[in-house]
Image (spheres, rainbow, N blue to C red):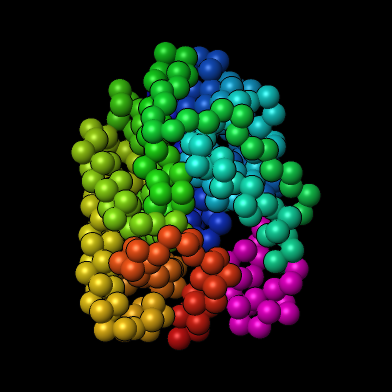
Amino acid sequence: MGDGLYAYLQPDGGWGWSNSGLIVDGESTLLVDTLYDLKLTEQMLGEMRLAVPAAARIDTLLNTHANGDHCYGNSLVQGARIVASERTAAEMPELPPAAMAALVKQAPEMGALGAFFLSCFGAFDFEGIELALPDETFSGELTLRVGSREVRLIEVGPAHTRGDTLALLERERVLFSGDILFNEAHPIAWAGPVSNWIAACERILAMDIEVIVPGHGPLAEKGAVRELKAYFEYLYEQARARHAEGMSALQAARSMSLDRWADWSESERLVVNIASIYAELSGASAPLNPLEAFQWMAELAAG
């Protein structure tokens, strides 16, 4: 992106294919997120070192949230201080790499659910990963310095996960959004509430920024955030009506027209977003069960 700011984008931005970023000023460096497994993270770090000699040593690693595709490679960033929100740090150990490795092994015996799970995660190698957890946490906001640059960390979760964090460079007018923005793909509200995600979109739209590095998908501008906000507002309206009619989240997803967003990938995530809205409407406090959510998505993907 120029001026010591770099985005590492993985096509096609689908399940597990996340983005990362690098901020450099002189010899000072900050890495925004690692990738889903050690091989991918090592490849990324190698490419960064070739492009930017200062990347041979990463001073600070920011994990924008707790999903493994943004933190499972942490152990390869040796010597860096790892920073995350308090809620992200608490959530990260809940689904360790060993659990993902076990699920991938069991998937062939899990029928349609297992086949769907493998279609999402079968390309990644979760064996032998020791998750390196944050050693510095914050709540609300924190400003980090990278040489003369200021990187403003803004906690906007719970939304996608419990502790979602934005990394804003105000002077450079660049935002690293983590998974608050899935560009050209359906988002997924693992934590919710969706109303918080809408509020996060509004907060981004109020920023004076030119470039957004999303958690998944190509580089974006604020128009992508406007579209995401419109998606969630439409979904909220449609889900509220179906909730009042007594439809299940899966029934609601099957009945809903999304022609405006028909070209977005991972449309099976719609059912999880509806379930999150249902939980918000009913005042439920228990988090979504991930395996149950994957069962719904497998059924929706199957037609």
State the image coordinates of residue 145 (x, y, percent, origin top left): 45, 18
Q: Position of residue 240 (x, y in %)?
A: 25, 72
Whether residue 182 is situated above or below residue 172 in the rendered picture: below
Q: Looking at the image, which is closer to me, 243 or 56?
A: 243
Residue 51 visible within the image: no
Q: What residue is shown at x 63% (from left), y 54% (from top)?
A: 95
Q: Which percent across, then down, holds residue 132? A: 67, 38
Q: Position of residue 199 (x, y in %)?
A: 27, 48
Residue 147 falls inside the magenta stretch: no
> Which region shows up in magenta?
105-126
In this picture, residue 110 sits left or right of residue 66: right
Q: Nearer the viewer, residue 163 or 221?
A: 163
Q: Residue at x 68, y 24 (%)?
A: 79
Q: Residue furthest right?
A: 128
Question: Is 120 one of the magenta-colored residues?
Answer: yes
> Is 160 situated above or below 254?
above
Name the residue located 40 percent from the left edge and 18 percent from the top edge.
149
Quadrant containing the N terminus in the rendered view: top left
Q: Is residue 111 left or right of residue 63?
A: right
Classified by dominant secondary structure, the portion drawn in magenta counts as helix
Quadrant that contains the C terminus? bottom left
Residue occupying the point 74% across, 47% down: 129
